[in-house]
Image (cartoon, rainbow, N blue to C red):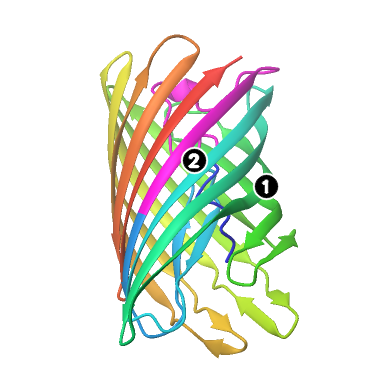
Amino acid sequence: MRLVLLVGLIPLVLSAKAVKVDELLTEKNKIQSDVSISYLNTQRNSSDVGLVEYQSANGDFVSIPTYLGSVESQSDRLVYSLSLRYGLNKDAEVFGFGNLYSSTERTLNASGTSSHSDSGFSSFGIGGVYQVRAEDDYPAVLVGGTVDLIDHDEMLKKNFYFKSGSAFVSSYYTSDPVVFFLRASYGYNGSHTNQNHSLETGNVLSITPQIHFAVNPYTSLNWGVRYQYKGKDTYDGNAISTNQSQLGWLFGASYEINAKSVISADMEKMDASTYSQSTMTLNYSYKF
């Protein structure tokens, strides 16, 4: 249940944030940095511990815990992320990412109200993207994945190594001024154990179709949906959630400031049976 952050942002290859499709991969022998901040607001009704899931632009899946005994809870989280991408050639790139977070959670139960604040390190990892085929008369296809070298389990208060990661396949097809984009990703989590306690977070399958519209050579808008299926979570061998599916709505915009800089803003609204979550991410990309 790595607070792997609420982010880290996978080369916007994953979410097609770049205004120009041919810039989804970093140029050969070039470096690109992505700096982002995400705000997540989560509201939950529950009498037990629960985990809510967030997928960062990097492709990582972040599990966020609520606390025992809460009847109603609301959390506000900020996630700060930096990723560095390096182009190996025209078809492949590698990247590294790191994430920090700060959070405040307010709960209401029979005993009254309470609040809890926390901040710190979330995760550090590496990943890669490879273009299997370039776009021509048929859609382009890319594959890739991430590995968390270190991720912090907020519930168990411990760092874990090589326990989680993700894999994805994405495809896009251009019909000016529209780009059709599709991504399927799978996030896996190993069992986390600290002394006598163990937490097992369910794996996650996510499918995201999007449409990107070029308003002009420098500005694009995007809309889409995200379907997510998540396995059950267990704490000390006891289930704290069931298998569940969710549907979220996405929309955003990107603007090319100059030949080296792109800024983007993206929003997502997702409702599940036990919680609702709204997310906003601001990202700044710079090419060295």
**What type is the residue that disc 1 sits on?**
Phe
The quarter of the image holding the N terminus is: bottom right
Percent across and percent down for residue 263 are 40, 24
- Quick check: marks 1 and 2 in contact, CB under 8 Å? no
Nearest the camera: 111 or 102? Answer: 111
Q: Compared with residue 151, is residue 217 higher up or lower down, i.e. above or below? A: above
Q: Secondary structure at mark 1?
A: strand
Question: In the picture shown, does residue 77 fall above or below 214?
Answer: below
Outermost residue to the top = 259
Say which mark, if any, is on residue 239: none
Question: Does residue 155 appear left or right of residue 55 in this picture?
Answer: right
**Amino acid, disc 2:** Leu
Label 2: element kind: loop
Highlighted range, magenta: 11-40
Identify which residue is drawn at 46% across, 56% down.
Answer: 103
Q: Which residue is mark 2?
A: 14
Q: Nearer the viewer, residue 251 or 206?
A: 251
**Residue 87 falls left or right of residue 261:** right
Q: Position of residue 174 (x, y in %)?
A: 36, 28
Q: Quadrant of residue 280?
A: top left
